Amino acid sequence: MKRFIDHYLKEWKEQSGFRPLLLRGARQVGKTYAVRELGKQFDNIVELNLELNPELKAIFKHNLDPHRIIREISSVKFQQIVPGKTLLFFDEIQAEPQAVTALRYFYEMIPDLHVIAAGSLLDFAIEQVGIPVGRVEFLYMYPLSFLEFLYASGANLIIKEILKHDIKEPISEIIHSELLRYISEYLAIGGMPEVVNSWSKEKNPLKCFAIHQRLVDSYKYDFTKYAKKFQIKYLDILLPEIPRQMGKKFKYSAVEGDFRKRELSPCLDLLVTAGVINKVYHTAAQGLPLGAQVHPDDFKIIFLDVALAQSLLGLNLGEWLIDPDQQFVNKGEIVEAFIGQEILAYSNPIQKKQLYYWLRAERTSQAEVDYITNIKQDIIPIEVKSGAGSTLKSMRIFLETHELSKTGIRFSTQNYSAYENIFSYPLYAVCSALKSEIAENLLKS
């Protein structure tokens, strides 16, 4: 399964002056698979899973001398570790925080050895021991984007049609209809690699939906690994509540039960750190960086994956496959979350992407723009309209009140079009609209 991250991993391997690499992302987004694929470009890969084999954690207890560490690993794994020829992979490294600290010494003392570490709860270990500043590099992974989903589905030729298309002209209606069909598939199947792999091979929706449920259960199981005992009940309550509030400003008061913000807020942050959810912060958006004008108490939330969010809600995902037109009309909040997921997927993986939106809460003139992003120095408002015939009043208000914003983007089921300074893109063209070059790498090999 080809991923955007493959290109960046290869670049890391081939660059001079590389540092140990921390691959970050939620559970089951494909980190281990991607590293193993990279390992095929080396003479050998030596892999240690510190969660699956907890006895290996003892290697880091004596001291953090990397020469001693690789001698012991070689003895235990019966494999030579040769700088320049071996990829050393610490999986689930968060199980031993001292292993994270050890990475700096690999860089300082064995700089020509390629070392990668990954972990589904890695950010908790980083919070505990800190980051070896200047001694490691980072890459971030997300679920498969829509374009990666197309590639996995064998539709790589149609990706080229999306990437080369000119906004000034509508695309062929045949291609447009086919791509909307794929969008409806994606909204049912989602972007979790195991589910996409099953769908591409068997096209069995019931099997995919069962995998969704198992993945949700695995996120619940993780609660015991990073939460205090008294917090687990709050996490159990919050997890299904988050998709119920998708598309709206999150309100603690709307959570079922008599709970206070001070009880729920830390637990919400735990889910963010685990990568299960992403906050979308309200920004004034009057300048860059967008995060400089954030209202931290005003935020929306999107789930890691749109299909998992719907599974949590108990929705019938098969309806996207049976009657997609009606679903596009009825489930605008799902489509909005999909666009947020796409914005993350097409961002530069070297840096963690933060999502923003804009809100004006004046009593006589309320307005809300679904997402705010920047393309280089341009601040871009983004509206998501799942059906036809929608107005863009909020976007026009935003453009009139923000001098640094010259153009806006609308995503919908409609074909390409442009009117004055607002450009309309189909839901399948997020990568093109954001002028992201990341997808070109998918087609190079």
Image: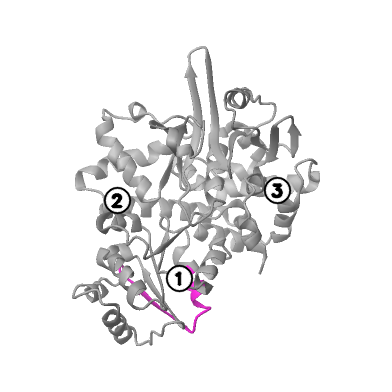
Task: Find residue 126 and report its image quarter.
Answer: bottom left
Q: CA distance from mark 3 to mark 2?
A: 38 Å
Q: Which is nearer the eye, 89 or 104? A: 104
The answer to which of marks 2 and 1 sits earlier in the sequence is 1
Q: Which mark is residue 18?
A: 1
User: Was residue 45 drawn as part of the magenta stretch in this picture?
Assistant: yes
Q: Write down the residue under mark 3.
A: 179
Q: In the rendered structure, which segment of residues is drawn in magenta?
A: 35-51
Residue for point 43% across, 51% down: 213
Residue 223, labelled with which disc? 2
Specify whether 399 is left or right of 105.
right
Q: Residues within 10 Å of mark 3 (few under 14, many from 20)?
A: many
Position of 70 with respect to 369 (left or right) is left
Residue 364 vs 169, above or below: the answer is above
- At label 1, counting other C-alpha atoms closer than 10 Å, the crowd grade (few under 14, some 14-19, many 20 or more) is some
The answer to whether marks 3 and 1 mark residues whose Cβ atoms lie closer than 8 Å is no
